[in-house]
RNA sequence: GCCGGUGUGGCGGAAUAGGCAGACGCGCAAGACUCAAAAUCUUGUUCCUUCACGGGAGUGUCGGUUCGAUCCCGACCACCGGUACCA
């Protein structure tokens, strides 16, 4: 590894980087004019959670990418919004507080200070006057405001949901705090306990979240993930009456055409009818089974799903298609949370039902021909049999016909179901946005009025579990208990806080108008800047964050707060930076690279350049110390191209022109511009290297080319860019200088090399004028000595000529 | 299992309206400079074969379409990401 002393003596990164960072701060070089007349460009990074361990080398990858685009766009005349902030609520700060008795607010503040220093040292062009922090009451006032709007519109509601309750700790745990059914801290047993929770009705937006994906410039894989997550499926609901009871239940199926093949039905263990319909003889068996299921952990119910279990209730349902009596079973392969919590089982044509039927000797009837019922379920298409009025039809028509029949006979209807569930929006934590709701002693509930927002977190000396499952806020009696000044009615504040996802679901709106006291942002400003033009972050947020943010945005659109249906027009996922052994970086493996060390040894510009040169932005590539050295070597090479040992400008840079560099310069401007636009930074850098190599070979570099090259390099290596620009005789910053243009006419060569092939293999080459005709090329190829050797004794069958490229002779 | 993606030198990776595979960088080798080293500069570097000129093979595997395939089609294998009995 290179250390400080190992670098060229002339380029002092520490000094130069500090100089320009101070310049940018002092001059507020990157301050954005919200209402500028220029065309707008909004380049957004996923803001970080300021953890105690500081910045990771993965962070600067995405940040550098948006920074390059931001710097280029400014030079292209855009008004650029490029902000940064902190997603600062979250579990680690609370855990730290529980462990040490210190304040999570103070801990968070320190972490932010570290992150901010580290980020500033990397030279990103953020407008720091727009910095936001989700834990700032001036910010979360509006997070709470959005919640009250959701509540007013009936999209926030309370439901009873099981949570991970740890009796020993007296607290509710997040899934990641539970390991093998024990608490991560202390190893105490954890049980599932139902608790009242706030939910957000994201399912009401399922269709729009799905449909509007179409118009977004997002990676296809990511859209697909969201589609799967939403999981829309079309089918039908079918009602089954229960034999001997005056009740019926409904099942959801995507294959109503197979109804004649339904030989039993299954209810989820949690289905409310299970207890009511179970017969006396089956009572013990069913209760035993329900108990068994309750004590199964999540893992056992999902992972060990190989062997199907279940029990007969003793009751029978009537198949509405043929009025046959079929048994009703209870089995945990049917989930209460999907569809209606009940299914019709068609073992002949559903793999899971087949497995279950085989296990419990239930009848299997073939209703779609094409498979072999003795071997496996057949889910393919085929003519229907044993199906009354559907016989002979194929699946598609049979589905339609069955749905019509069900509707006409009042036994069912067409139905669309989603996999997406409502959003569990409450956490039993202190360190989050308080949910602005008051529960009154008369049982009513009201939202905290807008003028009383923000509802600030009370300062608590020592944060400790309430012991009841409520958040530590329950201990803050002065805060929790309220009295209505008008009526004197007593009330209690909601003690649940919001999840970390809340603040990050709308932060990009606040950057646009961060200090607005009257609204979350000025509607006029939102109109100027939305949607975000480019949003870059890790793929780990592909589903939750991006779905939640889209949901809130659509809601805000519906109530007229934002002008667009979607928040992020173009989205890109950066890849991961792995350790040198191609493994994830982790403290335990000891392969973590600290950006501070690199900034110190190689400089921020080198780190930025290296991370962009490692490979395509979305690829996961292993860190390489020698690769990093190579990046530094290139910057040193650029420096020496223009600057002498004593710091003066080399006399290679001249006022005149040099046609030897014309082509490569214009090619470089073109390729770098296009590559930056497409986020192909690795190939842009390689072109900058090609130019540098050529520039080394000539005696004179026209100043215009030197300046153009520096402008192209500047977005990636801004400190060196500024310094070289200065030394080329231009005082002030390069930030708003015009982006270089290229001249297409300089790119065409009069004489080009074409390839001469025999049977598709290159056998010779020829230099010809660019506009040589097809016929001439053919003649030329046939006359070529090498080609004659290769075609001697053979018959020429065909000659393919691609003007400007090649001639291929088919001969045998 | 299902869905999505990716397979190219010793390594990171270039090149796809089908037309010279390996740009650029790393590493390695040789040379120049130096008392020497580092740094720097120059040259070479897919593999096999040949003293050389040259020839052959080659983009995960097998097959297809084509004058011509890294690129298009089919089957398969490996790895990465997502998801998990979703009826």
Image (tube, coloured by chain):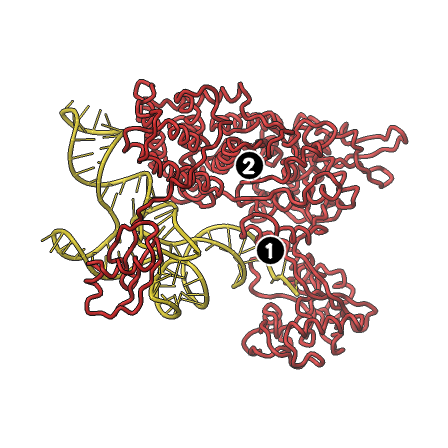
Residue B10 against residue A694 in the figure, above or below: below
Where disc 2 sits, the SS reads: strand
Residue identifier under label 2 = A45
Tell me where residue A769 appears, x and y as whole percent. 31, 49
Residue identifier under label 1 = A228
Which chain is in red here? Answer: A
Mark 2, other Cα within 10 Å: few <14 / some 14–19 / many ≥20: many
- Indicate the chain on which mark 2 is placed: A
- Indicate the chain on which mark 1 is placed: A
- Looking at the image, which is closer to me, A433 or A383? A383
Q: Residue at x 34, y 44 (%)?
A: A749
Which tint is chain B? yellow
- Looking at the image, which is closer to me, A533 or A461? A533
Q: Residue at x 56, y 40 (%)?
A: A534
Left or right: residue A655 compared with residue A132: left
Q: Residue at x 76, y 39 (%)?
A: A149
């Amino acid at each position: 590894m290179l250390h400080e002393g190992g670098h060229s003596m002339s380029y002092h990164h520490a000094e130069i980087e500090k100089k320009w960072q101070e310049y940018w701060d002092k001059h507020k070089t990157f301050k954005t004019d919200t209402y500028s007349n220029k065309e707008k460009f909004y380049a957004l990074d996923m803001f970080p959670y300021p953890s105690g361990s500081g910045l990771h080398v993965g962070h600067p990858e995405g940040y550098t990418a948006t920074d390059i685009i931001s710097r280029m766009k400014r030079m292209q005349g855009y008004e650029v919004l490029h902000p940064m902030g902190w997603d600062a609520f979250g579990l680690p700060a609370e855990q730290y507080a529980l462990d040490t008795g210190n304040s999570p607010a103070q801990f968070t503040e320190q972490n932010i200070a570290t992150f901010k220093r580290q980020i500033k040292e990397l030279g990103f062009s953020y407008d720091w006057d727009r910095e936001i922090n989700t834990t700032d009451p001036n910010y979360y006032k509006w997070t709470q405001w959005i919640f009250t709007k959701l509540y007013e519109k009936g999209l926030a509601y309370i439901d009873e949901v099981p949570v991970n309750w740890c009796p020993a700790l007296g607290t509710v745990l997040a899934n990641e705090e539970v390991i093998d059914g024990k608490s991560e801290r202390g190893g105490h047993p954890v049980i599932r306990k139902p608790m009242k929770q706030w939910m957000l009705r994201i399912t009401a937006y399922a269709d729009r979240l799905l449909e509007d994906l179409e118009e977004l410039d997002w990676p296809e894989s990511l859209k697909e993930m969201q589609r799967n997550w939403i999981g829309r499926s079309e089918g039908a609901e079918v009602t089954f009456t229960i034999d001997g009871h005056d009740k019926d239940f409904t099942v959801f199926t995507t294959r109503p055409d197979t109804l004649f093949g339904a030989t039993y039905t299954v209810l989820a263990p949690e289905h409310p009818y299970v207890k009511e319909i179970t017969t006396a003889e089956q009572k013990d068996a069913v209760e035993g089974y329900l108990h068994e299921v309750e004590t199964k952990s999540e893992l056992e119910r999902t992972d060990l799903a190989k062997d199907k279990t279940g029990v007969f209730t003793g009751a029978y349902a009537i198949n509405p298609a043929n009025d046959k009596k079929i048994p009703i079973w209870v089995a945990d392969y049917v989930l209460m949370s999907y569809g209606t919590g009940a299914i019709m089982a068609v073992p002949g044509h559903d793999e899971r039902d087949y497995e279950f039927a085989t296990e419990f000797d239930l009848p299997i009837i073939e209703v779609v021909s094409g498979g072999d019922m003795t071997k496996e379920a057949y889910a393919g298409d085929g003519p229907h049999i044993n199906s009354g009025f559907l016989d002979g039809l194929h699946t598609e028509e049979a589905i339609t016909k069955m749905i019509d029949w069900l509707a006409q006979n009042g036994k069912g209807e067409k139905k669309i179901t989603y996999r997406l569930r409502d959003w569990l929006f409450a956490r039993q934590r202190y360190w989050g946005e308080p949910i602005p709701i008051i529960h009154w002693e008369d049982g009513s509930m009201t939202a905290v009025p807008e003028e009383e927002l923000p509802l600030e977190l009370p300062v608590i000396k020592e944060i400790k579990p309430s012991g009841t499952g409520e958040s530590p806020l329950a201990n803050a009696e002065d805060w929790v208990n309220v009295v209505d000044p008008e009526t004197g009615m007593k009330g209690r504040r909601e003690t649940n806080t919001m999840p970390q996802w809340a603040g990050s679901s709308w932060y990009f709106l606040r950057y646009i108008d961060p200090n607005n006291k009257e609204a979350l942002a000025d509607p006029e400003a939102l109109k100027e800047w939305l949607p975000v033009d480019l949003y870059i972050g890790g793929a780990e947020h592909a589903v939750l964050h991006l779905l939640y943010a889209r949901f809130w945005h659509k809601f805000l659109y519906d109530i007229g707060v934002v002008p667009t249906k979607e928040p992020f027009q173009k989205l890109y996922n950066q890849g991961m930076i792995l350790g040198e052994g191609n493994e994830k970086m982790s403290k335990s493996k000891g392969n973590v690279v600290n950006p501070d060390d690199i900034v110190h040894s190689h400089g921020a510009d080198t780190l930025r350049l290296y991370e962009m040169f490692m490979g395509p932005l979305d690829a996961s590539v292993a860190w390489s110390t020698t690769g990093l050295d190579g990046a530094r070597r290139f910057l040193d090479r650029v420096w020496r191209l223009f600057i002498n040992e004593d710091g003066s400008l080399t006399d290679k840079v001249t006022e005149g022109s040099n046609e030897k560099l014309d082509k490569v310069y214009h090619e470089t401007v073109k390729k770098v511009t296009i590559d930056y636009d497409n986020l192909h930074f690795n190939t842009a850098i390689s072109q900058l290297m090609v130019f540098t190599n050529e520039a080394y070979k000539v005696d004179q570099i026209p100043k215009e080319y030197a300046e153009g090259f520096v402008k192209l390099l500047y977005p990636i290596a801004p400190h060196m860019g500024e310094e070289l620009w200065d030394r080329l005789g231009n005082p002030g910053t390069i930030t708003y200088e015009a982006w270089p243009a290229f001249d297409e006419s300089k790119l065409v060569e009069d004489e080009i090399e074409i390839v001469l092939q025999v049977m598709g293999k290159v056998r010779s080459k020829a230099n010809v004028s660019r506009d040589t005709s097809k016929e001439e090329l053919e003649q030329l190829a046939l006359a070529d000595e090498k080609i004659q050797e290769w075609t001697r004794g053979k018959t020429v069958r065909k000659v393919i000529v691609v003007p400007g490229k090649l001639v291929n002779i088919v001969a045998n």
